[in-house]
Amino acid sequence: MKWGILSVGSSNLQARAVVDFNGTPAFHIVSEARSSRFCDTFYPVRDLNESWMDAVSLSSLGYNKQLREGKFYRDEWVLFDYSNHSSLARTTNKNKEFKVSSGTIPGPVQDILSSMYLLRSKKLKVGDEILLDVNTKSNWPLVVKVLRKRTISVPAGKFDTLEVEPFLRDEGIFIQKGKRLQVWLTDDDRKIPVRLSVEVFFGNVTASLTKIGN
């Protein structure tokens, strides 16, 4: 991960395993971000985002966030109950004070992390606009535009990609709200994310693929 030309940390994104989530087989998706030793001196980051995605319907069953960005601290989990069209959320602050809330969901929904994996399952072409129903304690539509084809080079190699832009109306995988996010996916059936650029309050942070695991 880089901020301009400076290396500011590393990130790992993986579908770890198919697990039993309250009786439903689910992909356990994990995103971790950690700032470098240099960045720790002025803006330490230790983020963990988890999503549990129904292995059959590909809808989100729930997600968990543990965000540590500078002085910002939040623990949050949300569970979706499709039989009752409801959601249950708990948010905890640095003082261990927590708030529990509930809401309704219109049907199958995604969280931010699972929406990327759902997008990868679709056939994409330049000019497409994909609409996903997302819930991050409230319901909102996530519009993803397929902007252009582009060949890019990252540490893991050279790839033909599709550049897509999700238009976020709520928090993304970082705490920023309403900032620009761009993702470059391989232009093949795998649609591996090879670069991600997010606009944060102090500029742009770019994550480039260094290694593809099994």
Image: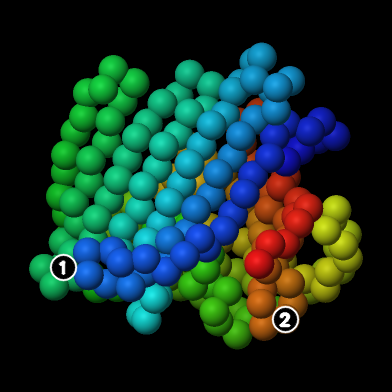
Residue 151: horizontal and vertical position, in percent?
Answer: 86, 68
Residue 43: horizontal and vertical position, in percent?
Answer: 61, 21
Residue 147: horizontal and vertical position, in percent?
Answer: 70, 70
Q: Which residue is mark 1?
A: 85
N-terminal label among 2 and 1: 1
The mark found on residue 189 in the picture is none
Q: Which residue is mark 2?
A: 188
Residue depicted at 59% across the width and 54% down the height: 13
Taking the image as shown, residue 131 lies to the left or right of residue 149, namely left
Numbered-mark total: 2
Residue depicted at 52% across the width and 63% down the height: 15
Indicate the amino acid at tag 1: His
Rate crowding at label 1 as few (under 14), some (14 to 19) or many (20 or more) other CA atoms within 10 Å. few
Q: Nearer the viewer, mark 2 or mark 1?
A: 2
Residue 173: horizontal and vertical position, in percent?
Answer: 50, 46
Judge whether 109 appears above or below 96 on screen: below
The front one of 52 and 184 is 52
Figure quadrant of the N terminus: top right
Indicate the amino acid at tag 2: Asp
Give SS at disc 2.
loop
Residue 90, quarter of the rendered image? top left
Taking the image as shown, residue 69 lies to the left or right of residue 85, namely right
